[in-house]
């Protein structure tokens, strides 16, 4: 088989795999989630296996503890989050009145410099944009409810994901060895090297950044709740989990917290408390958590991560979000490999290859 035929074979296989993945995206959520959890927990299973436990026993213990802690955490957090949401909904009129009172002097100053015609144009434009925003919001809500967070998806996550995680985690090493046997022999070492680079990148970001997110979610949730911020637990958890994309989660959480603090009255102790929480969280993340747990092993630019998450979500919904960072890691490693070979070739330096001269 010539090199052109081999390239055609792999390209056709890759396209067929992507098409199949797209067609099955509605049922893949528990399997992708189970694979992600199994990949995250595999090093722990390896340590327990080296300590003398069988792989099956180590897998059973890890799955019981992991999903037990997850279930216990959700059970404890659900009533608190529900109470905060109910309280927030009840206080929405008060928040609106407070914001209107604060904005009224500024609005009056603006109105003073506008003619009646300009005011009418401003009102009509605001109404049109508000209608557009509401329609967009309803469309997003409809897409979410009909996609990743439908009832069947939630049920599959609850009941199928633990089973998938158990079997994948138990058989992980066997699956890796089986895939290694399938590699084309004449390129096996190169493929193994690139796969190790992919694993290093994914492990450095997914495992390291996921640990950072969990620590920050706990810190921000507890800290903002202590300051007395309404919805402090929800905003804190969202801020910590949003740190999966560097800087983005922190900025969105800070804006939401300051806006809600102003709506609550804007007392200096509340605003100061919010500022202190985010200052400590930023120092903790930038100087301790990220250098220790993630380091410089990742090689993924924040803009590339944001793009991959948005593209994955647009193409495959929540499944695409789960697959976005691994796919971005694979593309990044393969792109660097292609660039290295390009810079060694005659396409880059203009010198003919030896085989072309013969």
Image (spheres, rainbow, N blue to C red):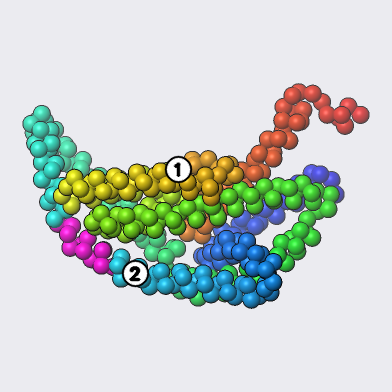
Q: Is residue 222 above or below residue 254?
A: below
Residue 258 is situated, as x and y percent measured from the top left of the image, at 26, 46
Q: Quadrant of the C terminus?
A: top right
Label 2: few (<14), some (14–19) or many (≥20) C-alpha neighbours in 10 Å? few
Question: 231 and 121: which one is in front?
Answer: 231
In the rendered image, the residue lying farthest to the front is 51
Pointer 2 with pointer 1, Cβ within 8 A: no
Please name the predominant secondary structure of the magenta segment in the image.
helix
In the rendered image, the residue lying farthest to the right is 358
Quarter-of-image position of residue 60: bottom right
**Residue 174: mark in rendering:** none
Q: Is residue 280 above or below residue 224?
A: above
If you read the primary sequence from the N terminus, does the residue marked by circle 2 or circle 1 appear first?
Answer: 2
Question: 315 and 249: which one is in front?
Answer: 249
Residue 85 is situated, as x and y percent measured from the top left of the image, at 26, 63
Would you say 239 lies left or right of 313 here?
A: left
Mark 1 lies on a secondary structure that is helix
Q: Is residue 237 magenta?
A: no
Question: What residue sits 48% from the left and 73% below the top?
Answer: 68
Which residue does the numbered mark 2 point to in the structure image? Answer: 78
Label 1: few (<14), some (14–19) or many (≥20) C-alpha neighbours in 10 Å? some
**Residue 286: mark in rendering:** 1
**Mark 2 to mark 1 CA distance (whole Å):** 30 Å
Question: Which range of residues does the magenta coloring cover?
Answer: 82-93
């Amino acid at each position: 088989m010539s090199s052109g035929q081999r390239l055609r074979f792999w390209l056709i296989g890759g396209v067929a795999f992507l098409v199949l993945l797209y067609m099955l995206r509605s049922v893949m959520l528990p399997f992708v989630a189970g694979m992600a959890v199994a990949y995250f927990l595999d090093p722990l299973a390896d340590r327990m296996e080296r300590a003398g436990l069988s792989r099956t026993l180590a897998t059973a213990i890890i799955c019981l503890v992991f999903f037990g802690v997850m279930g216990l955490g959700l059970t404890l957090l659900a009533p608190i989050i529900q109470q905060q949401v109910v309280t927030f909904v009840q206080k929405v009129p008060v928040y609106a009145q407070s914001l209107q009172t604060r904005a009224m002097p500024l609005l009056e100053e603006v109105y003073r410099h506008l003619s009646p015609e300009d005011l009418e144009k401003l009102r009509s434009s605001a109404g049109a944009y508000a209608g557009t925003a509401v329609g967009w919001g309803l469309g997003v809500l409809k897409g979410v409810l009909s996609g990743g967070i439908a009832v069947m998806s939630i049920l599959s996550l609850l009941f199928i994901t633990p089973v998938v995680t158990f079997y994948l985690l138990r058989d992980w090493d066997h699956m890796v060895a089986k895939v290694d046997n399938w590699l084309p022999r004449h390129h096996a070492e190169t493929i193994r090297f690139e796969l190790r680079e992919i694993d290093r990148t994914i492990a450095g970001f997914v495992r390291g950044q996921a640990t950072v997110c969990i620590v920050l979610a706990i810190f921000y949730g507890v800290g903002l709740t202590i300051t007395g911020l309404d919805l402090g637990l929800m905003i804190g958890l969202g801020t910590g989990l949003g740190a999966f994309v560097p800087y983005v989660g922190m900025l969105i959480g800070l804006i939401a917290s300051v806006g809600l603090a102003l709506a609550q009255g804007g007392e200096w102790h509340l605003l100061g408390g919010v500022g202190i929480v985010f200052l400590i969280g930023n120092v903790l993340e930038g100087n301790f958590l990220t250098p220790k747990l993630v380091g410089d092993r990742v090689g993924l630019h924040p803009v590339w991560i944001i793009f991959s998450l948005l593209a994955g979500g647009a193409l495959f919904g929540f499944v695409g979000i789960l697959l976005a960072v691994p796919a971005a890691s694979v593309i990044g490693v393969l792109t660097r490999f292609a660039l290295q070979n390009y810079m060694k070739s005659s396409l880059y330096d203009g010198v003919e290859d030896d085989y072309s001269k013969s």
